[in-house]
Image: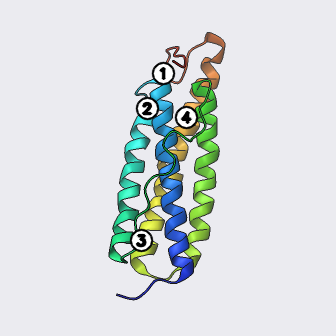
Amino acid sequence: MDTLSVAEVRALNEALDDEYRSWATYDQVIADFGEIPPFSNIREAEARHIEALRTLFIRYALPVPPNPWSGKVVRYTNLQAACEASVKDEIANGEMYARLLKTTQRPDILNVLRNLQAASQQRHLPAFQRCAQRSADSADSGTGCHGRRRGRE
């Protein structure tokens, strides 16, 4: 197996760290507000993204770092704020993957990075945009993403 370049190793580490942060963020939102879509669905997708990246780490004999983000992510005061922040995070995620794709020509790495970027931009971003819009539409009534009021515990 060929040795990865420094840029490729950095790219894989950055991608994994970003997926860890996303998973931990959505996990915290769920802890604060309950098992609600899209956070519950996308948290599960983030777990699959982490596994896809871990597979590359194992394939290239890289040490797999643990998730450093549990308990260290931003907490939101309401679902509207969580949805809006998640929209921004998914936009940034797409930009990050566009940059990371330029670091390698390896088909296996390109495939994983492209798949993760596509999931972020084609599924996660629209889901969070809908959530933000629903939350904004229901702000006057005091309800959240799914028509129920939940507070932090």
Residue type at tag 4:
Arg
Q: Residue at x 48, y 54 (%)?
A: 19
| Residue bearing the label numbered 1 | 146
Q: Which one is closest to the eye, mark 4 or mark 3?
A: 3
Q: Mark 1 packing: few (<14 Cα in 10 Å), some, or many (20+)?
A: some
Give the residue displayed 58% in from the left and 38% down from the top. Answer: 129
The amino acid type, in three-letter code, at marker 3 is: Asn
User: How many badges with numbers are in the image?
Assistant: 4
Marks 4 and 1, how far apart at CA = 11 Å
Q: Which mark is drawn over residue 111?
A: 3
**111 w.r.t. 77: above or below:** below
Q: Are marks 4 and 3 in contact (CB under 8 Å)?
A: no
Q: Position of residue 112 (x, y in %)?
A: 42, 67
Between the residue at mark 2 and the residue at mark 3, the CA separation in whole angstroms equals 27 Å
Residue drawn at x 61%, y 11% as measured from the top left = 141
Q: Earlier in the sequence, mark 2 or mark 3?
A: 2
SS at badge 1 = loop
Residue 37: mark in rendering: 2
Mark 1 belongs to which amino acid? His
Question: Residue 140, located in which quarter of the rendered image?
Answer: top right
The kind of residue on which mark 2 rests is Pro
**Extreme-top residue of the structure:** 141
Q: Residue at x 61, y 47 (%)?
A: 89
Q: Is residue 9 visible?
A: yes
Mark sitting earlier along the chain (4/2): 2
